[in-house]
Structure formats: C-alpha cells, structure tokens
C-alpha cells in the first residue's frame, strides 16, 4: 500500500526558506550572529522537504498544486 505525504509549502516559500536557512547557518558559523542562527538548519530542511510541522498543526498550506507525494513500498 503506498504511503502519502502531503506537502504544505509552495515553491516561492521553499526557495525563501532554503536561502534564509543557509544564510543563518553561515552567519552563525562565522560568528556574526550567535549560535541561535543554527536554527537555519531546521528552516533549510523544511524547505527541502516542502513540509512544515507548524503549518500542519495550524492547518496552513501555501502549496497550490501537486501537493501530494506517493511513496511506493514495492521497490524491489
């Protein structure tokens, strides 16, 4: 039986999250901002996965179309 994941981030928001997350990590690594900047890792991961757990809890979705991904368990 295929498993389904429902994306809740649209493409523009994904791009912004990825760029913002990477920027925060770099700024934190070069000590321009404090270690809290490493929260950028979580922001980047959510952008790469097109999924935000907080959005799911709040019932928010910025995904316009093609928001469902099928994962087929029968890969042999």
Image (cartoon, rainbow, N blue to C red):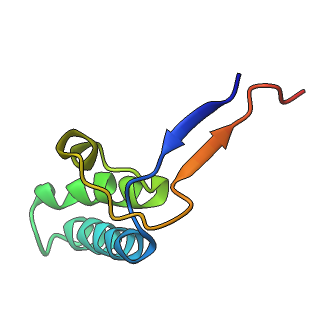
Image position, residue 12 (x, y; %): 39, 78
| Residue under the point 28% across and 65% down | 25
| Residue under the point 21% across and 54% down | 39
Image position, residue 1 (x, y; %): 71, 21
Report the front residue among 42 and 68: 68
Report the front residue among 9 and 64: 64
**In screen coordinates, is 76 left or right of 41?**
right
| Residue under the point 25% across and 54% down | 60
Residue with the most extreme right position: 76
Q: How many numbered circles does the render carry?
A: 0
| Residue under the point 74% across and 33% down | 72
**In screen coordinates, is 8 left or right of 36?**
right
Residue with the most extreme front position: 65
Instruction: Determine the image quadrant of residue 58.
Output: top left
- Quarter of the image with the C terminus is top right
Image position, residue 19 (x, y; %): 36, 76
**In screen coordinates, is 76 left or right of 9?**
right
Instruction: Determine the image quadrant of residue 53.
Output: top left
């Amino acid at each position: 039986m295929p498993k389904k994941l429902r994306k809740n981030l649209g493409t523009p928001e994904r791009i912004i999250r990825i760029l913002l997350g990477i920027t925060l990590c770099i700024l934190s690594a070069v000590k321009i901002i404090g270690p809290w900047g490493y929260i950028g890792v979580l922001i980047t991961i959510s952008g790469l996965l097109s999924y935000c757990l907080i959005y799911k809890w709040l019932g928010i979705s910025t995904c316009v179309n093609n928001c469902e991904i099928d994962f087929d368990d029968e890969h042999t």
